[in-house]
């Protein structure tokens, strides 16, 4: 890994960017649907609902309740009890993620729409919690979540960075919208839960076809910065 000079602040999404958690979320939502006498959903359908946070995910499958209603919060609690019981039974880090995060000398942060409690549980299970993070922001950590600029601005404030040298790395539309709102570079992940076409409309600054592309992208970026 290159030294920290001229390296950007990297703000990562979680699901579909650092981890592949779709199987465990799929199992959990289907368990809940069966309990309530509802038809199960296939994995592609479930994946299309990942990215806006677990409260929104539950609300998508129980739409008769409003998002912030007492009933939907109760359904979220029910889902979390199922999900947190398995959490990483089938969830994995994408190849190269741990090694990169463990050795990246620049500042890094997490901005996910997943609730903070399961996020921190996942971090502990994979040993990510011992790494040096500027901030770890869940969907319920601040007054607003992605696509708001607030989670990214919070991370930039903590790191003492401006948007000009900050990258938002994610696989979803909320990630791209948040980056646009904050004025950061948009790094679209094509190996996650959104299609390339869904992300192309946001005109990303860079594209990662695999997580391993990030190291070479940073090396090129640093070389360009040093040559100026």
Image (cartoon, rainbow, N blue to C red):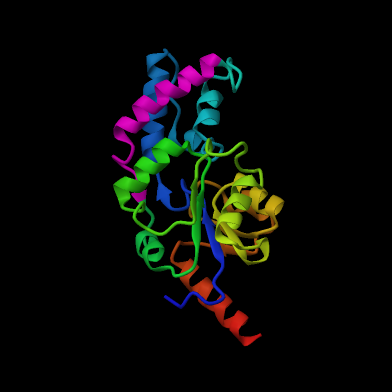
Is-magenta flag for residue 85?
A: yes
Observer-nearest residue: 121 or 32?
Answer: 121
Q: Horizontal and vertical percent for residue 132?
A: 41, 59
Q: In the visual, does 213 lie left or right of 173? A: left
Residue 75 shows up from this direction = yes
What residue is shown at x 38% (from left), y 68% (from top)? 103
What residue is shown at x 56% (from left), y 78% (from top)? 222
Q: Is residue 160 above or below residue 14?
A: below
Observer-nearest residue: 15 or 73?
Answer: 73
Q: Is residue 188 above or below residue 27?
A: below
Residue 197 shows up from this direction = no
Q: In the visual, does 59 lie left or right of 181? A: left
Observer-nearest residue: 137 or 216?
Answer: 137
Q: In the visual, does 123 lie left or right of 170? A: left
Is-magenta flag for residue 187?
A: no
What residue is shown at x 46% (from left), y 78% (from top)? 3
Observer-nearest residue: 101 or 187?
Answer: 101
Q: Horizontal and vertical percent for residue 20?
A: 40, 47
Q: In the visual, does 228 lie left or right of 112? A: right
Q: Horizontal and vertical percent for residue 228?
A: 66, 85
Most extreme residue toward the bottom, as rendered?
227
The residue segment tinted magenta is 70-92
* Main secondary structure found in the magenta portion: helix
Image quadrant holding the N terminus, namely bottom left
Q: Horizontal and vertical percent for residue 111?
A: 53, 48
What residue is shown at x 63% (from left), y 52% (from top)? 153
**What is the count of numbered marks?**
0
């Amino acid at each position: 890994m290159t030294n920290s000079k001229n390296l950007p602040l990297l703000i990562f999404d979680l699901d579909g960017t650092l981890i592949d958690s779709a199987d465990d979320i799929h199992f959990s939502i289907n368990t809940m649907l069966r309990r309530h006498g509802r038809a199960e959903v296939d994995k592609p359908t479930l994946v299309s609902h990942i990215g806006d946070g677990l409260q929104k995910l539950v609300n998508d499958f129980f739409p008769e309740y409003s998002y912030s209603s007492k009933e939907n919060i109760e359904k979220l609690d029910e889902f979390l009890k199922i999900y947190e019981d398995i959490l990483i039974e089938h969830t994995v880090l994408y190849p190269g993620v741990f090694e990169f995060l463990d050795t990246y000398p620049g500042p890094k942060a997490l901005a996910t729409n997943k609730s903070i409690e399961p996020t921190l549980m996942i971090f502990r299970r994979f040993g990510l919690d011992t790494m040096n993070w500027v901030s770890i922001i869940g969907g319920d950590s601040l007054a607003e979540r992605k696509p708001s600029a607030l989670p990214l601005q919070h991370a930039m404030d903590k790191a003492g960075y401006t948007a000009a040298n900050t990258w938002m790395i994610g696989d979803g539309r909320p990630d791209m919208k948040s980056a646009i709102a904050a004025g950061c570079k948009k790094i679209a992940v094509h190996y996650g839960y959104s299609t390339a076409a869904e992300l192309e409309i946001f005109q990303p600054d860079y594209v990662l076809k695999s997580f391993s592309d990030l190291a070479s992208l940073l090396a090129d970026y640093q070389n360009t910065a040093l040559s100026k």
